[in-house]
Image (spheres, rainbow, N blue to C red):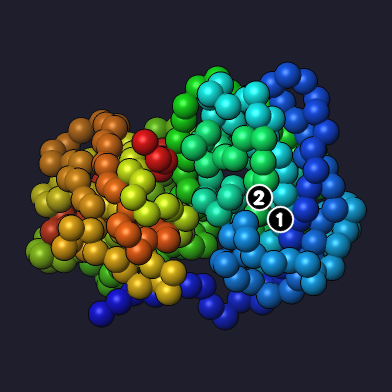
Amino acid sequence: MTKKVWFAGILSLVFVVIFSFVAMADDSIILTGKWSFQFDDDLAWADPEYDVSDWETYTNPADAPALGFGWYRLDFEVPAEWEGKGDLELSIAELYDFDWSFVNGIGVGNGNRSGNRKYSVPASYLNYGGKNTLALRIYTINPGIGLDGEIKLSLTGVVSMVKNPSFEQAVNLPLGWTPTRTDKNIFIWENAATVRTGFRALALKGTDALEGEEAAWMSDIILVKPGTEYRAQAYVKAEDPTGETTIQIRFYNADGDEVFYDGERAVSRNLARRTADWTRGNLFGTAPEDAVYARIFLVSNDNSGIVWFDDVSFGAE
């Protein structure tokens, strides 16, 4: 049975952006331009080839009537001379309240509270000296402003990964997360006291009655390219684990159906077999031919202990 990954039943506001850029310095550019707007919500709008010519436009994105989900899109150019100088950092001054951010159709990060954003944009995602597209899927809780202030791209000089793609959301059951199983014997929660860095970690706890059972956190979707190798990384802390604690990458096609990886449902690695402090684990997998999206699963299987997850990353190798 296939598993759909689409979101449903949400009142949406869509906002598309077309940007030019103004050069600031040798290692950064500020993005400015005319923003486009359209009601409704569709993940296809992350596609840089999607036609937005019939959308309303705004000079200032803060003027859009933001409420619920909205999309902000822009086309921009990265200087050709930046090629080979490392990854970029996307900096957004003000964003309200949750976001899913894409560059050229590929997810670069997600945030869970109002404020600024800083996301790594891998160099492999970019077209140097040509057209690039930034798409921001933003959820605004109260009527007001969804996106405002300066948006800047800067050279970092290093290669990095996408950090916490829709992980660590600031609610009990984070937006975009779904437990694969819940009953009175499984506890899935955010723990603000046990963290490696930042504000919170995610925890899974079971009981002895759960022999053979599984509980998992599931991330929001991340856009991927077929044939590209990806690395998922997570820090795990375990207390008396009796079963397996795994990180998984699962791939999906354009219809949201799972695409099997070498005959298996997921690329998987066991990260915690015994009580241990925070330990980093890496998992590598190549997106299958029909893959368009991926999700990261953090799984506790046949486990009566407690496991915490923090600082999850995902990126192309």
Position of residue 306 relative to residue 48, above or below, is above
Pinpoint residue 222: horizontal percent, then vertical percent: 46, 55
Between residue 193 and residue 171, name the one nearer to us. 171
Pinpoint residue 107: horizontal percent, then vertical percent: 52, 50
Which image quarter: residue 208? Answer: bottom left
Label 2 to label 1, Cα distance in Å?
7 Å
- Residue 17 seen by the camera: yes
Residue, x 65% and y 54% (percent of image)? 135
The answer to whether residue 97 is left or right of residue 292 is right
Find disc 2 in the rendering and name its residue: 133
Q: Residue type at mark 2?
A: Thr
Q: Are marks 2 and 1 in contact (CB under 8 Å)?
A: yes
The answer to whether residue 21 is left or right of residue 291 is right
Q: Residue type at mark 1?
A: Arg
- Residue 115 seen by the camera: no
Position of residue 25 relative to residue 232, above or below, is above
Pinpoint residue 58: horizontal percent, then vertical percent: 88, 58
Badge 1 density bin: few <14, some 14–19, many ≥20, Cα 10 Å: many
